[in-house]
Amino acid sequence: MSLFKSIIAVYLISLFLTPFQASAQVLSDNNSNLPGIWSGSTAWGDYDADGDPDLLITGLTGPAENCVPIARIYRNTAGTFTDINADLPPIYLGKAAWGDYDGDGDLDVAISGFQATGNSITRIYRNDNGIFTLDTDQNMVSLRYSNVAWGDYDADGDLDLLTSGMT
């Protein structure tokens, strides 16, 4: 065995025999009563500006033989999540994202995906003091198997919406 191979072998053996300490975070169910979803998305955002991250959830929930699409916003109050019953269209195989597209200081919602009817949608919902209203001024291509993302791609100071998916 060459000297180089011997050095490498000793190094590898010492690496495996050297004790080390690993640390991990313990995760546990916090009994939040949030629905389990699949074929959906989740996004954190503080829509009510109270300092607690709120949760936007889309996707299918329930057993496979009776699943239904949802789109819900859960207000976070000190770790307790409450459905605000926002008037968002239930979707799956898509995505929803927070962004302040109208520049008024609160988070609005872009949403895209399949509805239970089989129709595809892509829409923006404006947040006015916690009430989410469809922005009918935006004419958008309806998508499924979709993604939406906010960003200021042209550096003009306002958010732009990137969408991708299947028409």
Image (tube, rainbow, N blue to C red):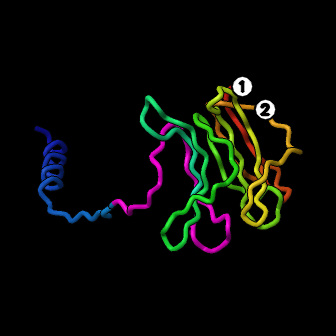
Q: Which image quarter: residue 53?
A: bottom right
- Counting the numbered discs, the total is 2
Up/down of 135 relative to 128, above or below = above
In-image side of 74 versus 34 (left or right): right
Residue 48 pos. (x, y %): 67, 68
- Quarter of the C terminus within the rendering: top right
Q: Farthest residue toward the right?
A: 137
Q: Which image quarter: residue 162?
A: top right
Look at mark 1 in the image and give the residue it sits on: 167
Residue 89 pos. (x, y %): 68, 42
Dot 1 alpha-carbon crowd within 10 angstroms: few under 14, some 14 to 19, many 20 or more = few
Query: 23 or 111, which lies in front?
Result: 111
- The stretch in magenta equals 29-53
Q: Which mark is residue 141?
A: 2
- Quarter of the N terminus within the rendering: top left
Q: Which image quarter: residue 113?
A: top right
Q: Amino acid at mark 2?
A: Val
Query: 51 or 17, which lies in front?
Result: 51
In-image side of 159 versus 23 (left or right): right
Which structural element holds mark 1? loop
Give me the C-alpha separation between circle 1 and circle 2: 7 Å
Residue 40 is covered by the magenta coloring: yes
Asked whether the beta carbons under mark 1 and mark 2 sit within 8 Å of each other, the answer is yes
Which residue is pictured at 45% across the width and 46% down the height?
36
Up/down of 59 relative to 16, above or below = above
Q: Amino acid at mark 1?
A: Thr
Q: Earlier in the sequence, mark 1 or mark 2?
A: 2
Dot 2 alpha-carbon crowd within 10 angstroms: few under 14, some 14 to 19, many 20 or more = some
Which residue is pictured at 76% across the width and 50% down the height?
125
In-image side of 23 versus 92 (left or right): left
Residue 66 is covered by the magenta coloring: no
Residue 155 pos. (x, y %): 82, 55
